[in-house]
Every structure is written in structure tokens, then in C-alpha cells.
């Protein structure tokens, strides 16, 4: 894990050890500092999948439900089926065009 301030302190100590002629202690300080200067690779987090996966049978069911219940809004249909509201209009259009 990265700890740059501590690594700087260790490198300062290594310089003092070198000035005093103690190369063994300087090497150990430099080795510790090198370990502290490495950082973990950045891995972006992916948001969890919020919506339900839709298959063809569910698309047809959504289309039928929307056409059989014209007074119900797309937002209510999306909540009922657990899908994105934008997908409801797409599936209704597909259903109307195909059937």
C-alpha cells in the first residue's frame, strides 16, 4: 500500500545513513521506501445492475398489458414489470409493429 510521506522520511534517513557511512542501514531504508511507493492499480467500481433482464416472452407480455390497459402510464408499467421506463415504450412499439 502506498504511503508517500513515510517513504520520503525513510529516504531522508537513508541519505543521513549514507553521509554517516552506514550503507547497510541506507539500503534497508531504501528498500522499505520502495515498497511504500507502489500503489495498487486503479479498478473502477461498476454499479450493480438495477433493472430486470427482458426476454421475448416478457416483451410480448408488456406489449399486451400496455395495449389492454391504455389508461395506465408507462411509469406504472415499468414499476409493475421491474424494467426501465424507456424500455416500456420500445417494447410496446415492437409489439404493435409485430402483432
Image (spheres, rainbow, N blue to C red):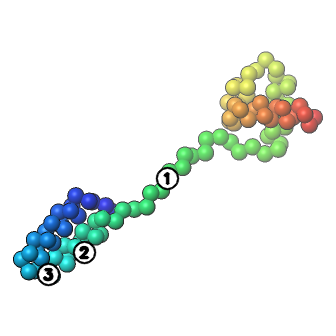
Badge number at residue 44: 1
Left or right, residue 77 beside residue 93: left
Residue 88 position within the rendered picture, expressed as x and y whole percent measured from the top left: 75, 32
Residue 83 position within the rendered picture, expressed as x and y whole percent measured from the top left: 69, 36
CA–CA distance in space, label 1 to label 3: 41 Å
CA–CA distance in space, label 3 to label 2: 12 Å
Q: Residues within 10 Å of mark 3 (few under 14, many from 20)?
A: some
Residue 14 position within the rendered picture, expressed as x and y whole percent measured from the top left: 15, 72
**For residue 82, what is the image quadrant?**
top right
Which residue lies at the image location 10% right of the left edge and 71% below the top edge? 16
**For residue 39, what is the image quadrant?**
bottom left
Q: State the residue lying farthest toward the right.
A: 99
Q: In this view, does 33 lie above or below 94?
A: below
- Tell me the element at label 2: helix
Q: State the residue lying farthest toward the top.
A: 71
Q: Tell me whether circle 1 and circle 3 mark residues in contact (CB < 8 Å).
A: no
Front of the two marks 1 and 3: 3
Front of the two marks 3 and 2: 3
- Tell me the element at label 3: helix
Which residue lies at the image location 19% right of the left edge and 73% below the top edge? 29
Q: Is residue 71 above or below residue 7?
A: above
Residue on which the image places disc 3: 23
Residue 63 position within the rendered picture, expressed as x and y whole percent measured from the top left: 83, 32
Give whichever of 15, 56 is nearer the camera.
Answer: 15
In the rendered image, is residue 93 in sight? yes
Give whichever of 77, 10 is nearer the camera.
Answer: 10
- Dividing the image into 4 quarters, which one contains the N terminus? bottom left
Which circle's residue, 1 or 3, is located before the other in the chain? 3
CA–CA distance in space, label 2 to label 1: 30 Å
Residue on which the image places disc 2: 31
Which residue lies at the image location 87% right of the left edge and 34% below the top edge? 95
Which residue lies at the image location 24% right of the left edge and 71% below the top edge? 32
Amino acid at each position: 500500500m502506498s504511503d508517500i510521506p513515510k517513504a520520503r522520511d525513510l529516504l531522508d534517513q537513508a541519505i543521513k545513513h549514507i553521509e554517516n557511512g552506514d550503507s547497510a542501514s541506507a539500503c534497508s531504508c531504501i528498500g522499505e521506501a520502495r515498497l511504500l511507493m507502489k500503489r495498487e492499480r486503479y479498478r473502477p467500481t461498476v454499479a450493480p445492475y438495477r433493472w430486470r433482464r427482458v426476454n421475448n416472452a416478457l416483451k410480448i407480455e408488456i406489449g399486451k398489458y400496455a395495449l389492454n390497459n391504455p389508461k395506465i402510464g408507462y411509469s406504472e408499467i415499468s414499476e409493475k414489470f421491474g424494467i426501465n421506463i424507456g424500455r416500456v415504450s420500445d417494447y410496446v412499439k415492437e409489439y404493435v409493429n409485430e402483432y
